[in-house]
Image: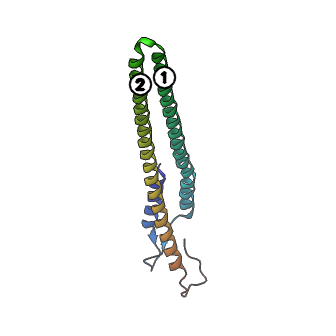
């Protein structure tokens, strides 16, 4: 299950918890169940972080493969250019053809770089969106926890009795 779904599940659990008698803001829930779900969430977060690291590693591999391919294409173009120039009868033609091959190779290399950059940008944008949603959910959870803590600090007749949660 996605960590964001786990967080939503925890929020729903808190929202659906039974109210403490005579109170609208205090509630009760199964402590063991809540701890178990929080531990599951904690266990899932590292896997999401590993997935993000894998995306970055894949990006690096793709960028490096694109660079190698671009270098190979440029090298082939330069080699072809040098070979054609060495033949006297077609020197002028060879210079033009070599220049065209190099320009084509550079264009292809640039296209590959742009494709890789677009892929990486999309992957990072998706990861950024995931992290933004996760942080927002965490912040909402913490705000609710702080609000509940503030409510629990009220000292009434039963100040000695612990809160039910």
Identify the element where label 1 is drawn: helix
Q: Secondary structure at mark 2?
A: helix
Q: Quadrant of residue 16?
A: bottom left
User: Which residue carries the number 1 mark?
Assistant: 76
Local crowd at mark 2 within 10 Å, few (<14), some, or many (≥20)? some
Q: Residue 127 placed where, x, y %? A: 46, 50
Where in the figure is residue 111, as x and y percent of width and height? 40, 35
Could you say which is closer to the camera, residue 35 or residue 118? Answer: 118
Residue 162's tag is none
> Which residue is nearer to you in this view: 145 or 75?
75
Check disc 2 and report the residue beneath it.
101
Horizontal and vertical percent position of residue 125: 43, 50
Say which residue appears at 45% left-offset and 16% top-offset. 84
The reply to whether the C-beta atoms of the residues labelled 1 and 2 are less than 8 Å apart is yes
Front residue of this view, candidates 73 and 60: 73
Seen in the picture, residue 33 relative to 58 is either above or below; the reply is below
- In the rendered view, tell whether residue 133 sits above or below residue 143: above
Pointer 1 or 2: first along the chain: 1
């Amino acid at each position: 299950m996605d960590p964001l779904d786990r967080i939503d599940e925890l929020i729903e659990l808190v929202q659906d918890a039974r109210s403490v008698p005579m109170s609208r803001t205090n509630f009760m829930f199964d402590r063991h169940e809540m701890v178990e779900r929080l531990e599951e969430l904690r266990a899932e977060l590292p896997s999401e972080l590993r997935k993000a690291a894998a995306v970055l590693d894949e990006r690096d591999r793709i960028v490096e493969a694109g660079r190698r391919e671009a270098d190979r294409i440029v090298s082939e173009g330069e080699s072809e250019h040098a070979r054609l120039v060495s033949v006297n009868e077609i020197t002028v033609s060879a210079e033009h053809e070599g220049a065209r091959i190099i320009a084509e190779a550079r264009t292809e290399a640039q296209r590959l770089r742009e494709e890789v950059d677009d892929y990486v940008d999309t992957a990072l944008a998706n990861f950024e969106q995931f992290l933004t949603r996760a942080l927002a959910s965490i912040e909402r959870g913490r705000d609710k926890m702080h609000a509940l803590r503030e409510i629990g600090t009220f000292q009434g007749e039963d100040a000695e009795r612990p809160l039910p949660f």
